[in-house]
Amino acid sequence: MKETDGDAATRLSLETRLAGLRQPALDRATTWPYSEGELGRFAYQRYDHPLAAEVERVLGELEGGRALLFSCGMAAIAGVVLAFCKPGDAVAVPLGAYVSTSHLISEELSRFGLRLLEFDQTGPPPEEAALVWLEPCSNPMLSFPDLDDSIARAHEHGARVAVDATMLTPVLLRPLEHGADFSVHSATKLLGGHHDLVLGIASCAHDEDVERLHQVRRLVGLIGSPDPAWLLLRSLKTLPLRVRRCSATALELARRLREHPAVESVNYPGLGDEVAARYVSAFGPLVSFVVRGGAAAAQALESSCELIENATSFGGARSTIESRSRWEGERVPLGLLRLSAGLEDVDDLWRDLERALTSL
């Protein structure tokens, strides 16, 4: 399934459904009164609140499962690991995936008996893993797994599978429809889309998993608060338009970067990744590329851009660029830059990039 608009003859398009969302009132209450001594739908904001419930309804429908709102993407990741792993379990995380996912397991949760297994997600996952993490496209190296095969193999060995689909969103990919147990998003990125909120989403394919994950969220206090949830509901109305525009711009920039003499290599699944093309019709806003000259050249380029903001994160209306070795060291090529295409005109962005590349 390449997009999630469905059959136009039987239901409204994704764009129409999201554009028609009504914006709810901003309810910041932390407590709600009992009704004749009995708990109602809401009691205490750390447990649940009306705006979280509305976000979860909308995202659950988009994902084809049941969604839970978290305070950030890493909180959603941590919630899944804490809820469904036990001491002695191995968690398989792709090489070149988001660095904080690996660090959470190796540097923090290893003290509680969890083991990190890093693997090439373009091949089969490790058989000994209790939880397999997949990341299409991986951040920042942009590898793409064969989802159906990897999920089936993991389930054969009794593992649960979580897919971080932050870069693609439910507009382009619904991991639960491919058999994943969990679909995780940093809503700070494309779902929010304006660099003005921090939230996370974890969607579950199985009802019993929702109850377990909800218990962990409630006890640890990982729920997202009302204000960013309200902003997220605003942002979802334009999600399909933003995702497709950013993806088209990223593809064009990747094509032009590939031809520039200052660029050694370009990573973008839209440049001929046949596996990725089987699953999605567009490939998200991120392009990573290696410039000649290593870390010094990468840092010089990111500082030379004027229109493209030198900042971390991705998926906003404004394009951003950064050298990733400052965060990841030798896990990535020292000359690697990560570019997030925003909503600006592609020719304006290319002029800014080309000028910075020429200055190298």
Image (cartoon, rainbow, N blue to C red):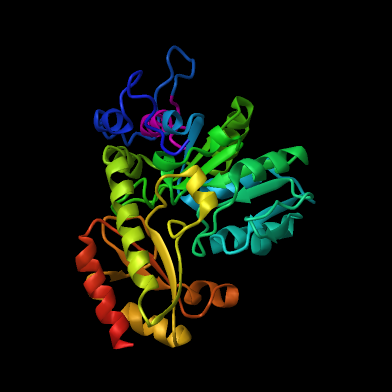
- Residue at 71% of width from left, 45% of height from top? 85
Q: Please indicate, yes or no, whether residue 338 appears anywhere in the rendered image.
A: yes
Image coordinates of residue 250 in percent, x first then y, are: 34, 59
Q: Quadrant of the C terminus?
A: bottom left
- Residue at 68% of width from left, 59% of height from top? 119
Q: Is residue 117 left or right of residue 252?
A: right
The stretch in magenta equals 42-58
Asked if 303 appears above or below 339 in the picture, the reply is below
- Residue at 61% of width from left, 28% of height from top? 206
Image coordinates of residue 68 in percent, x first then y, are: 49, 35
Residue 52 magenta-drawn?
A: yes
Q: Which residue of the protein is positioned furthest toward the top in this rendering?
A: 36
Residue 326 magenta-drawn?
A: no
Q: Is residue 245 left or right of residue 121?
A: left
Figure label count: 0
Image coordinates of residue 81 in percent, x first then y, are: 64, 47
Q: Looking at the image, which is closer to me, 333 or 266?
A: 266
Q: Please indicate, yes or no, whether residue 24 appears anywhere in the rendered image.
A: no
Q: Looking at the image, which is closer to me, 286 or 77?
A: 286
